[in-house]
Amino acid sequence: MKLWPAGEIATLHKLRERFLAGTAGAADYWRYPDELPLYDSTFGERIGWKWDAVLRELALRGWQPRSRRVLDWGCGSGIAGRRALSQWNSLTRYAAHDRSTMAMRYATERVRADFPHIEISPSREVDADTLLLLSHVISELSARQLDELLEVAPRAGEIIWVEAGTHTDSRRLIEVRERLRRTPGGSPEDHGRAAHGTFEVVAPCTHRSACGLLSAKNERHWCHHFAHVPSDVFQDARWAEFGRELGIDLRSLPYSFLVLGRDSAPQAPGFSRVIGEAREFKGHAKVLSCHVDGVADLMLQKRDAPALHKAVLRGDEAPLFRWQIADGRIVGGSKEIGD
């Protein structure tokens, strides 16, 4: 027996086709009001799991925004804003921005229902007290539209930007990182406010230097990670049917992300981060490791450090390590956060 009505499956196919075709940014993504709750409970929820992974990592790193106002830019169904409001009770105001008035209305109504204590802000301006959230928008922006966004973004207090974990989207997000890194903040109206410090990279990077993936030898690589899918999803018949009907592997949830803050505390020296997933071979593993000195493909033999080898292959979120390296191989080290 089918658990999803045929009409809903057809709508989900159309929504996915619009996104994959890259045409969603050319016009209003939403055609009918009932598309938004359907999207929110399916594709939106999967995006929410990516936000959960990012927010868990930020908690593990001991970081939180100073801003009190959320601006959910390109809000869609508002999944990013609701995840942030759930994470930090220091946030007191919410604003939705989208080309679609239908989407802004839905996102705002959900916030009103789920967070009645949160003030709905009518302003969509970006200022020093703004936590700017962006989610799965980069593939929909032309070069000109991205330029316009990056002219406004430096006015924010902090930015959390989450994208699909594709090579193309990740590479565009690296460009954003390099353009915003150490960018002075504020606008003339913000004169004298505390958030005027430069943007510093908070995550996923372990350093503030230029991205090591920009070197010619790393052109084929991209900065992506994998979010954990809640275990109960795999016991849910509706999710199983959703995956089959849409051709989606529910087990794999890649994402790319960037978090920027003002004068954030630097990472401790010596941290490295595993990009993507470690690859397992007989007796050893290989990891694409990001460090202040760049990005390198490193080997870790099981016999050199059995416990570390196991931790690397476990594939935890926020895979930050301190490596001990000899002759270009990892010979020891420790897991820093996320145990």
Image (cartoon, helix red, strand yellow):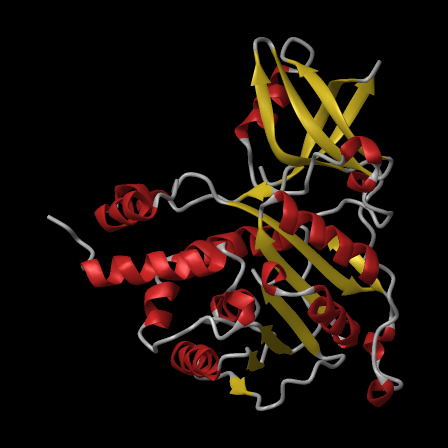
Tell me what residue is drawn at x 78 percent, y 39 percent: 213
Q: Position of residue 166 (x, y in %)?
A: 59, 45
For residue 12, above or below residue 196: above
Residue drawn at x 66%, y 21% as measured from the top left: 286
Does 334 sit left or right of 81 as displayed?
Answer: right
Q: Is residue 219 left or right of residue 37?
A: right
* Res 247 → quadrant: top left
Residue positioned most to the left: 1
Specify whether residue 243 is in view: yes
> x and y percent of residue 288 in the render?
70, 30
Q: How many marks?
A: 0
The residue sitting at 59% across, 23% down in the picture is 279
Depicted 202 relative to depicted 194: above or below: above
Residue positioned 42% across, 73% down in the render? 30
Question: What is the quadrant of the C terminus in the image?
Answer: top right
> Which corner quadrant of the image does residue 310 belong to?
top right
**Relative height, residue 292 to residue 90 (above, below):** above
